[in-house]
Image (cartoon, helix red, strand yellow):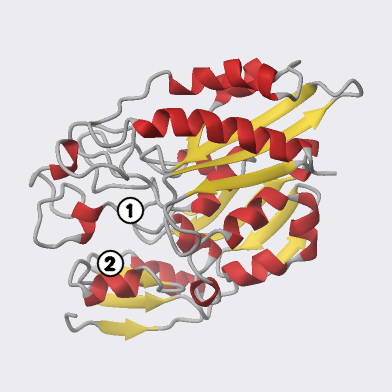
């Protein structure tokens, strides 16, 4: 780990100004950042600890539920209002990392964690995210865990957050403050596709901080589930995940659907075409499977991850059926 200076400002304006200085990085929970610093993959000259800022807490509002960015994952997972009105979010939180990590990691920080692509994490190999222009060995190398959607010839790394998948499905807003004032961003617009600049992962500006998340209330949010398929039962990243929420009419047909998948995209991947195609469908395997086939459109699998396309289709059906069981 390289030497760095450290500050812990109590004034948000000071924190934003310090974070905007080139070479500075923000510390929240630090569960991802500290690991990368120890490995030498991140070497900030100055660390701005924002844990003293007033960005914590959970409150039900007229919009839905507002969660401060510094709220710990474990705090959110235990919140009764969130459990009752937005169960898909709680299930995504409980599927994330380990209890020890969830006690420290923050809601805002989780959205900004770096990819788990093995080439990004291996300092000895090239990686365009880590060193622009050095190449992407995953394209023709070990790419079992990499993305089939949203990639480019510069990068096919998947986004790692379980939480982000659930939040994207529910049209969550990200509230930020920065040197240019506050913003309200759809979470779906926060993360950038890699394109020619995979090292630029979000639309956040220098010094801009996530302050809170606002998750709208809806019938589909109340009847929602999160399914995570992985190689081992705990502390493992998703091969494929699916966040599904549905609203049913009096006849048991789908009136509204919310659907996003993880483990397959370079950012949390919403499936609006399938959401539209599900309207009016019966909640049965026979009716859902043909619609789930649409999920494979536009996929660009590599030699080691083509299995994800079929696995994703099956996960979508399972997640939708599970959402139908929520009362």
Who is closer to the viewer here, 37 or 301? 301
Question: Is residue 89 visible in the rendered structure shown here?
Answer: yes
Q: Position of residue 146 (x, y in %)?
A: 30, 42
Q: Is residue 20 above or below residue 300?
A: below
Q: Which residue is the extreme one toward the right?
A: 250
Please give the name of the residue rendered at 37% of the width and 68% of the height, measured from the top-left corner.
Answer: 32
Q: Position of residue 318 (x, y in %)?
A: 63, 35
Q: Work out whether mark 2 precedes mark 1 in sequence or the reverse, and give the earlier one.
A: 2
Q: Position of residue 70 (x, y in %)?
A: 55, 70
**Residue 21: numbered disc:** 2
> On the image, numbered disc 1 is attached to which residue?
115
- Asked if residue 135 is positioned above or below residue 110 in the image, the reply reads above
Along the horizontal axis of the image, is 324 left or right of 319? right
SS at circle 2: loop
Disc 1 secondary structure class: loop
The mark lying in front, picked from 2 and 1, is 1
Residue displayed at 52% across by 55% down: 176
Please indicate, yes or no, whether residue 56 appears anywhere in the rendered image.
no
How many numbered tags mark residues here?
A: 2
Which image quarter holds the C terminus? top right
Mark 2, other Cα within 10 Å: few <14 / some 14–19 / many ≥20 = few
For label 1, the crowd category at 10 Å Cα-Cα, with few meaning under 14, some 14 to 19 and many 20 or more, is many
Residue 148 image offset from top left, x and y in percent? 34, 32
């Amino acid at each position: 780990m390289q030497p760095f200076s450290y500050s812990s400002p109590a004034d948000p304006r000071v924190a934003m100004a310090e974070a905007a200085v080139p070479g500075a990085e923000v510390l929240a929970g630090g569960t991802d950042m500290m690991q990368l610093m120890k490995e030498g993959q991140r070497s900030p000259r100055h660390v701005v600890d924002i844990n003293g800022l007033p960005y914590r807490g959970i409150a039900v509002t007229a919009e839905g539920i507002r969660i401060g960015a510094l709220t710990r994952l474990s705090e959110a997972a235990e919140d009764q209002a969130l459990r009752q009105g937005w169960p898909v979010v709680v299930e995504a939180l409980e599927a994330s990392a380990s209890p020890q990590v969830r006690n420290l990691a923050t809601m805002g920080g989780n959205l900004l964690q770096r990819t788990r692509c093995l080439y990004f994490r291996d300092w000895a190999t090239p990686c365009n995210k880590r060193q622009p222009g050095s190449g992407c060995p995953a394209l023709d190398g070990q790419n079992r865990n990499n993305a089939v959607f949203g990639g480019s010839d510069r990068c096919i790394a998947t986004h790692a957050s379980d939480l982000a998948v659930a939040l994207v499905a529910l049209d969550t807003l990200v509230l930020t403050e920065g040197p240019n004032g506050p913003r309200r961003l759809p979470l779906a617009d926060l993360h950038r596709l890699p394109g020619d600049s995979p090292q630029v992962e979000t639309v956040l500006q220098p010094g801009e901080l996530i302050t809170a998340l606002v998750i709208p209330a809806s019938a589909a949010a109340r009847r929602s589930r999160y399914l995570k398929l992985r190689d081992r039962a705990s502390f493992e990243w998703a091969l494929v995940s699916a966040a599904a929420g549905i609203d049913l009419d009096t006849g048991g047909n789908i009136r509204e659907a919310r659907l996003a998948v993880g483990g397959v995209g370079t950012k949390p991947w919403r499936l609006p075409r399938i959401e539209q195609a599900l309207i009016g469908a019966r909640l049965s395997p026979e009716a859902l499977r043909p619609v789930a086939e649409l999920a494979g459109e536009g996929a660009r699998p590599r030699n080691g991850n083509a299995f994800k396309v079929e696995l994703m289709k099956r996960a979508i059906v399972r997640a939708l059926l599970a959402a139908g069981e929520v009362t």
